[in-house]
Image: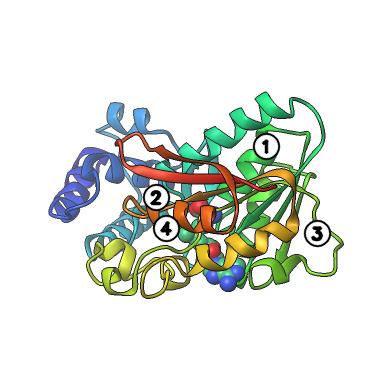
Amino acid sequence: MEINHLLKKGVEMIKDREYGNPVLEAALLLGKLLNVDRTYIYTHGDTEVSQPIVDKFLELMEKRRLGYPFQYILKEKEFMGLEFYVDEGVLIPRSDTETMVEYILKYIDEKYKDEPINFLDLGIGSGAIILSIAYYKKNVNAYGVDFYDPPLKIANINKERFKLSNVSLYKGDLFQGIEGLGLEGKFHIIASNPPYIPNEEIKTLQTEVKDYEPMSALDGGEDGLRFYKKIIPESKKYLKDGGLLIFEIGYDQGKKVEDILLKEGYKDTRILKDLHGLDRVVMGVVG
Ligand SMILES: C[S@@+](CC[C@H](N)C(=O)[O-])C[C@H]1O[C@@H](n2cnc3c(N)ncnc32)[C@H](O)[C@@H]1O
């Protein structure tokens, strides 16, 4: 079958999916299977595709048709200009999370410049946050914790992919992961994008998310605030005086999380909006 014909067939198969971009997805997938870029796909419509590749392409497009996330098929997701390896078992990094990462990078530049600093990420997933910070700021000594094996495995693959020697990853339940390492009072910044979807809302999410992304990365308990309530008090033990605690939050959680920060004695609290104008980041300083 020729590229043009196959592409059309693929687009037709997934055109009714509510979330996605059928032409782009079909071209990217065929490009990946043929080991060529998207431009080649668009400019070589007459080229014949071998039968095994036709079969593989149609098999994966069928998976996509049923709602399987495109990034798990491609096994890649771009975040902060880096190509992260992703697969089942980790949250696919969201562009909304770049709001927090960009803020942290700017904060490090302004407050610490090239001074060596300690950074902690709780709930690393694919490593999107911790590895982007460690990649762009070589003065950062980065520690990351996750409770589950798939994120740790995938984040370690990405750590190798980006050749980062300033990153240490640990398994554990939040701060338990770094217990006994003598890191109390040592962190300049603690960041987390914890699971924050309230139980009841999970069933309302799109198929791609609720049926395929890990529940352990989504479920924030009854009110969605379970992790903030645990991390905020405990962080005081691990942050330096003047250290920053910064979170990604759901669009309607800014005020609620800020209130917990204030109640626990954090100062200089702020809420940042994402590119859609929704509350997305909340932070406070200890001391
Ligand atoms: C919303 S995901 C964020 C992943 C990644 N940081 C990102 O922004 O793409 C939350 C992560 O927290 C992890 N997690 C859930 N419960 C945890 C716990 N008790 N201790 C440590 N990590 C946990 C999940 O495995 C998941 O990787």
Question: In the rendered view, does 196 fall on the left or right side of 278?
Answer: right
Task: Report crowding for label 2: few under 14, some 14 to 19, many 20 or more residues within 10 A (C-alpha).
Answer: many
Tag 4 or tag 2, which sits nearer the N-term?
Answer: 4
Q: CA distance from mark 2 to mark 4?
A: 30 Å
Q: Quadrant of residue 31?
A: top left
Query: Residue 60: image x %, image y %?
Result: 33, 60
* Nearer-the-camera pick, 57 or 190: 190
Q: 52 and 181: which one is in front? A: 181
Residue lying at 21% horizontally and 38% vertically, measured from the top left = 4
- Marks 4 and 3, the one that precedes in the sequence: 4
Q: Which mark is residue 184?
A: 3
Q: Identify the element where label 3 is drawn.
A: loop
Residue position marked by numbered label 2 in the rendering:
254
Q: Which residue is disc 1 drawn over?
A: 135
Task: Point out residue 261 in the picture as x, y percentages from the top left corner.
Answer: 53, 54
Mark 1: C-beta under 8 Å from nearest atom of ligand 1: no
Find ligand 1 in the image and state its quadrant.
bottom right
Which mark lies nearer to you, 2 or 1?
Answer: 2
| Disc 4 residue type (three-letter) | Tyr
Q: Nearer the viewer, mark 4 or mark 1?
A: 1
Residue annotated with mark 4: 72
Front-lying residue, 258 or 69: 258
Q: What amino acid does circle 3 point to?
A: Glu
Horizontal side of 67 relative to 213 (left or right) equals left
Circle number at residue 238? none
Does the numbered disc 2 mark a residue whose Cβ is under 8 Å from ligand 1?
A: no
Identity, as a three-letter code, of the amino acid under mark 2? Gly
Q: CA distance from mark 3 to mark 2?
A: 27 Å
